[in-house]
Amino acid sequence: MARVAGLEIPNDKRVWVSLMSIYGIGEVSAKEICEKTKIDLNMFVKDLSESELDVIRGYLDKNFEVEGELRQKIFRNIKRLKDIRCYRGIRHKLGLPVRGQRTRHNARTRKGKSRPVGGLKRKLEKT
């Protein structure tokens, strides 16, 4: 397996598809990397030479924040929002939707499984 950005990318896939397994690289970025480094999109990773892999590694290091760096940056940004207690930070802290979605009927992904608040009152039977 080829090692790029501290991660083993799959050998049995095309180069641009394998690059998408790196956190922070999507389809557009992967194809852009292949174009800029002059590597054929249809080539498989197992067919790449070591020099071609070095070119990809160098391009990624210069132009992209990926994997650990990107995760840390995102975590720090969210922590900053929580620390300054802005609206978005409070929503992150409470585990509620951050970007203005409704919470009355939906938002189960962020809020978790619904819990009942109180039991129904039983009707007293007349005897």
Image (cartoon, helix red, strand yellow):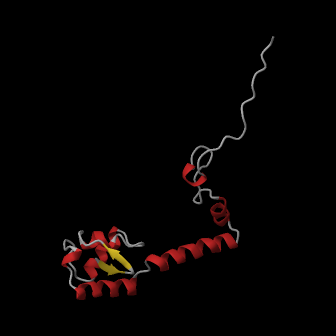
Residue 17 locus on image (x, y percent): 29, 68
Image quadrant assignment for residue 118? top right
Asked whether, in this view, residue 41 is left or right of residue 93, the answer is left
Residue 116 locus on image (x, y percent): 67, 40
Quadrant containing the C terminus in the rendered view: top right
Residue drawn at x 57%, y 46% as measured from the top left = 106
Residue 34 locus on image (x, y percent): 26, 78
Q: Say if 100 sits above or below 124 in the image.
A: below
Residue drawn at x 68%, y 67% as measured from the top left = 86
Asked whether, in this view, residue 89 is left or right of residue 32, the answer is right
Image quadrant assignment for residue 97? bottom right
Q: Nearer the viewer, residue 113 or 38?
A: 113
Residue drawn at x 61%, y 44% as measured from the top left = 114
Residue drawn at x 54%, y 52% as measured from the top left = 109
Q: Nearer the viewer, residue 22 or 80?
A: 22
Residue 93 locus on image (x, y percent): 66, 63
Q: Residue furthest right?
A: 127
